[in-house]
Image (spheres, grey):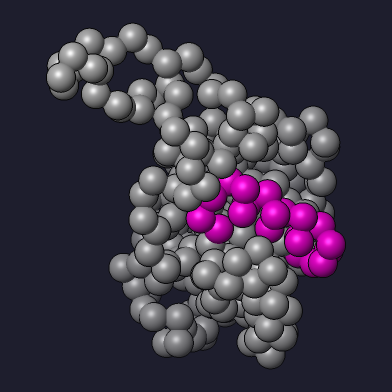
């Protein structure tokens, strides 16, 4: 390995420059790379309990900029729940409160996820994941046995365009790189809980999301009133009577989302 190759291998700043430019990372006075640990004000998720010893944001940075799946991610087994409506999502949130294990739920805005809503329970081994699956499956069936519940490994983003999760491995080069990053990047695993007012903000955004996507169960949280008034329509009439239609402002109530949701997970 020549001098340039040696320097390139050790050059963390250039590889992480996009994260420095957007303020997600910064250099400390001692030369270490630190993270922005402030709470996110526009998260789509309500966290019931934060997973200990896991720095998911940092591990995603490593995947995006260094091309490897962190060893901690390879130990992560998620029980995924796919609610179909806002009402089901709210009931799932109550289940997460009662179980009080590392979990979150919210609206799915990612392009890589097929579905409007999601709930996630985090486990540190396949055995614990299977135990959690059986528990969550039983609890979610009390809402509806038709709600999808499954167990998967790591994050979907790591499998898209890459190896299947059953083919993941940790090479010697990765071990060496992880050790080097551990020396220079501060891994802030201490998590700040969401305050109640932030959770209220997130839940309000869920209601708007349901409205936008034709999920009329949002009206469970508006006393049956539409979020916005119906607009005046001027379409043709049949036999002297206006054709019955539903405006986007005040559609007819139904307890199911308008769009079909396939059984895919995040």
Of 99 and 102, nearer the camera is: 99
Which residue does the image show at 37% across and 12% down from the upper left? 231
User: Which residue is situated farthest in the front direction here?
Assistant: 239
Which residue does the image show at 58% across and 72% down from the upper left? 145
Quarter of the image holding residue 54?
bottom right
Quarter of the image holding residue 100?
bottom right
Q: Quadrant of the N terminus?
A: bottom left
Residue 259 colored in magenta in the image: no
Q: Position of residue 101 (x, y in %)?
A: 80, 67
Residue 29 shown left or right of residue 222 in the figure: right
> Is there any visible trace of residue 76 in the rendered image?
no
> Is there any visible trace of residue 206 in the rendered image?
yes
Query: Is residue 152 placed above or below 92 in the rendered structure?
Result: below
Q: What is the magenta segment's predominant secondary structure?
A: helix
How many numbered tags mark residues here? 0
Query: Is residue 187 placed above or below 131 in the rendered structure?
Result: above
Residue 100 colored in magenta in the image: yes
Q: Position of residue 258 (x, y in %)?
A: 39, 46
Query: Is residue 260 placed above or below 6 in the rendered structure?
Result: above
Of 106 and 76, nearer the camera is: 106
Which residue does the image show at 68% across and 49% down from the upper left? 90
Q: Position of residue 156 (x, y in %)?
A: 45, 66
Segment colored magenta: 83-102
Which residue does the image show at 49% across and 37% down from the upper left? 253
């Amino acid at each position: 390995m020549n001098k340039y190759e040696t320097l390139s291998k050790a050059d963390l700043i250039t590889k992480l420059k996009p994260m420095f430019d957007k303020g997600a990372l910064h250099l400390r006075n001692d030369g270490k790379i630190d993270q922005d640990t402030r709470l996110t004000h526009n998260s789509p998720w309500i966290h019931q309990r934060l997973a200990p010893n896991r720095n998911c944001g940092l591990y995603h940075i490593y995947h995006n900029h260094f091309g490897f799946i962190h060893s901690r991610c390879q130990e992560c087994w998620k029980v995924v729940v796919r609610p179909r409506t806002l009402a089901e999502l709210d009931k799932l949130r109550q289940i997460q409160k009662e179980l009080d294990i590392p979990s979150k739920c919210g609206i799915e805005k990612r392009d890589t996820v097929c579905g409007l809503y999601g709930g996630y329970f985090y486990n540190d081994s396949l055995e614990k994941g299977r135990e959690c699956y059986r528990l969550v499956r039983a609890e979610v069936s009390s809402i509806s046995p038709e709600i999808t519940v499954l167990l998967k490994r790591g994050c979907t983003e790591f499998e898209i365009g890459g190896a299947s999760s059953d083919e993941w491995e940790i090479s010697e080069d990765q071990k060496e790189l992880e050790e080097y990053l551990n020396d220079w990047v501060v891994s802030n695993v201490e998590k700040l809980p969401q305050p109640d007012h932030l959770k209220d903000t997130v839940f309000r955004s869920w209601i708007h999301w349901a409205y936008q996507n034709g999920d009329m169960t949002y009206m469970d949280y508006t006393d049956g009133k539409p979020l916005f008034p119906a607009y005046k329509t001027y379409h043709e009439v049949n036999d002297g009577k206006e054709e019955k239609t539903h405006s986007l402002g005040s559609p007819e109530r139904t307890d199911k989302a308008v769009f079909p949701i396939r059984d895919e997970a995040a």
